[in-house]
Amino acid sequence: MAESNYWTRLSAQRVSRRRALRGAAVAGAGIAGAALIGCGGGDEAPAAPAAQQATPAAKATAAAKATAKPALTEATLTSAIGSDIGSGDPQSLGGTGGGNWPNTDTHFVHAGLLDIDQESRKLVANFAESWEAAPDQLSFVYKLRKDVTFHNGDPLTAEDVKFSMDRGALGQAAYNKDYKGGHSAQFASLVKNAEVIDKHTVKFNMLKPDVIFLRRGLFLVPKAHIEKVGDVVYAEKPVGAGPFKFVSRVPDSQMVSERYDGYYGKPDKPTVSGVHQPFIKRLVQKVIPDSQARLAALQAGEVDLVHNVASDIAKQLEKDPKFTAFFLSGDQPMHIHINTALEKDPATGQPNPWRDKRVRMAANLAVDLDGIIKGILTGKERPSYGSSSTSVGFPKDLPQQRFKQDKAEAKKLLAAAGHEKGFDAKLWGPGGRWPNSRTVMEVVGQSLTDIGIKTTLQELQYQEVTTRFKDRSLYPLCFWGMSGGDDPGANFRFGYHSGGNYTMSTPSKEIDALIEKSEGEFDPAKRSELLGEIIKKFYLDAQWIFLYEPVTVVVTNKKWNWAIHKKTLSNPEYWRIQPA
Amino acid sequence: MRRYLLLRLLQSLLTILLVVMVVFLIARIAGDPVTLLVTFDASQSDINRLKQELGLADPLPQQFVRFLTDAARGDFGISFRTNRPAMQEVLSRVPASAQLAGFALLISLAISIPLGVLAAVTRGSLVDVIARFFALVGQAAPNFWVGLMLIFLFSVRFGWFPTGGRGGLDHMFLPALTLGTSASASLTRLTRSAMLDVINSDFVTMARAKGLPRRTVIFKHALRNALIPVVTILGVRVGVLISGSVIVETIFAWPGVGRLIIQAINVSDFPVVQAAITLTATSIVLANFLTDIVYMFIDPRIRYVRS
């Protein structure tokens, strides 16, 4: 892909009115070409993962600022985001409750009992200052901090925690039987009930042990306030206990929030995970769906920060002294899923060639992953080794055993598997769901064709892909991304295990057994060892065609400084951004 | 006359019903929305429970009958995404789309009628060539390209207008100009060709021979008759514009019906998709119906007879 696109080239030029008019006069002749080029901007990035790399200039500025004394300011930061939340209620389907719907607000307005330490990846205290699991893992007792208040001034109590679990997670809202908590489908089969022990102690009783229960998010909401105003009003004007308090929202237009002065984490005394009151006074998030229009808003000075900038534009902006580009490394590794669940090719009735490890190895060796990363993507992506982000931790020796493009070896492997003449394959994918997905699919398809696997592409709606994953009817390949979250083992059951909802692979019985064992292993060290073994075996067995960990690009103008703190996040750390 | 109107009304209702039925089926064929509502690790029993809660576990015919019965009462269900009534969600976007559509229509009429008339009466002149070139370019240029170019010029370079969002007149100008340009291109061509037909007809020659002033001949005799096909197209466009322009609303971050429909389709928010398409289909059918009625007032010669 070219280093610059039509938009950035145009933006780099100085345009006088005469030149603009001249340009307009010849525009007609260039329409067809321009239209084709313009089409390239269609790939919309989803709300994406983890943070990490800033440009060298940004790092230097960040380091300098880090030594300065942090100060609360009266500044307003205006950002441009690609999509709006469905609801301000974090427990509803359109808030964070809907597993895959974007959530741009609730990470700041609402928060939970525990948090993740960014360095150690361990669970740390947040609104709960301590917690204890029963030896049989069938109950958890949390002691709450006494200095946490909601944005309306109400103190956080055990009643609020119980209410949040009942309403959001278990779908039991006594005051409104019709309320549908978004998490109900996830939690209802795990949690029996929540019990108030005293004003600042609460207990969750489990139906069965769950090794990652503590890492499952539960946003806390104020009981008395919701019972008073009702669900509809609450969804329009949410009240949380996070570092930002909600001010106003016009659906699909903009959302305004302000620093919450009562937040217990202060710049000089942050929470255990490092969160504190925002440096800025006010945050305005404008919803601008088109990525080029978002960039135009930044260039026109209407916004200070833009989320989800296309990779080719990001490469250009990285060199622009007017802006700072931040490359947020992702926790949703991309891969080509291989259907080995079906014994026979449904179209021809022939045995499924992908069940042979040599064919899968050949496919991995056919792909020029470095070329994809440097040519199509931002160049900052890391190779993926499965469904877990490398930032979450996995076997240290795995990168040395990485598959690297070797077409001759790939052809040999195919021949050894009895496919000298190759065979046909279809590569499915959910269209523009991920940045540059169509282009990546084309390159992978061509690479496979080059070694004899004649590949054709077929795009589907995202939800159709998810539906067909369940009945394993996407054959034989599918471009796919899976978020591992904060725990590497969180998605093994549904993404790796042969009985999982989102796998069409059939890993060995040994891998299945390891996954089952890891789910019953509560000792962190032993569990970590098991997870590493699973990741390694799955990779070396070439169960998928492993691709990359995507990055999301955030660009700011020079008025702001952002010393990136978190390793994994789906949005900029607005609480940490301060005027330059 | 009354029988004709009744028949047209029934045809319109049938059209709306067919559209809604097709949308109902296609939305469900495209995938299971519950897979988007739950996290990846939800078990099958969890998914089934949510399907029950949302009424998606029933057989399709049963779901369709329930949908029609509720829709007849104006109840299109609750949006999966926002937890608000679906029709309320759609109606809340209509003012934005209608405002943009109204302004875009004004712009398109202000450009197309004078330009079309001028091109016709000065046929073969430079003005005619420019008008035809404008019509060609306006129709060929895709809205997203025109929109981005306008943003680039007038927002980024000159800083005259905001890049997007809904606000005052300044916010509306660029999106309305984008929509209006494409609409005016086709209307200019149509006005020009209709005018050419009319100014060569006998009654215009007669008017000229009577010594009527040129302005009277053009505007009172020729234009009035040439407007009939223009009104037809305009009627259809009004319906389409009110239902929202997906591309323009997306580029200019305009919170209208078009953008809502796309969002709802992306997450299989059936209630909103169904409510929005029902409203859209109704507005287009209604616009066509009204156009037929307006015909009779524009041209008294037009009368409906039973064939």
Image: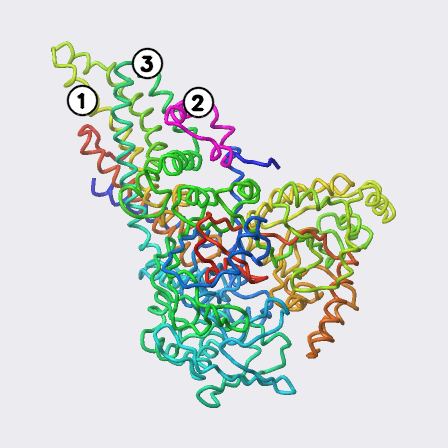
Image disc number at residue A26: 2
Whole-number angstrom distance, CA of label 2 to CA of label 1: 34 Å
Which chain does the numbered disc 2 sit on? A
Give x and y (percent) for residue A196: 47, 88
Amino acid carrying label 2: it is Val
Q: Secondary structure at mark 2?
A: helix
Which label sits in the foreground, 2 or 3? 2
Q: Quadrant of the N terminus of chain A?
A: top right
Give the residue at mark 3: B126
Whole-number angstrom distance, CA of label 2 to CA of label 3: 17 Å
- Answer with the quarter of the image where residue B227 lies: top left
Q: Is residue A212 magenta?
A: no
Amino acid carrying label 3: it is Leu
Tell me if label 2 and label 3 are in contact, CB under 8 Å: no
Provide the residue span drawn in magenta.
Answer: A7-35
Give x and y (percent) for residue A295: 46, 44
Which label sits in the foreground, 3 or 1? 3
Q: Observer-nearest residue: A41 or B83?
A: A41
Q: Observer-nearest residue: B100 or A284?
A: A284
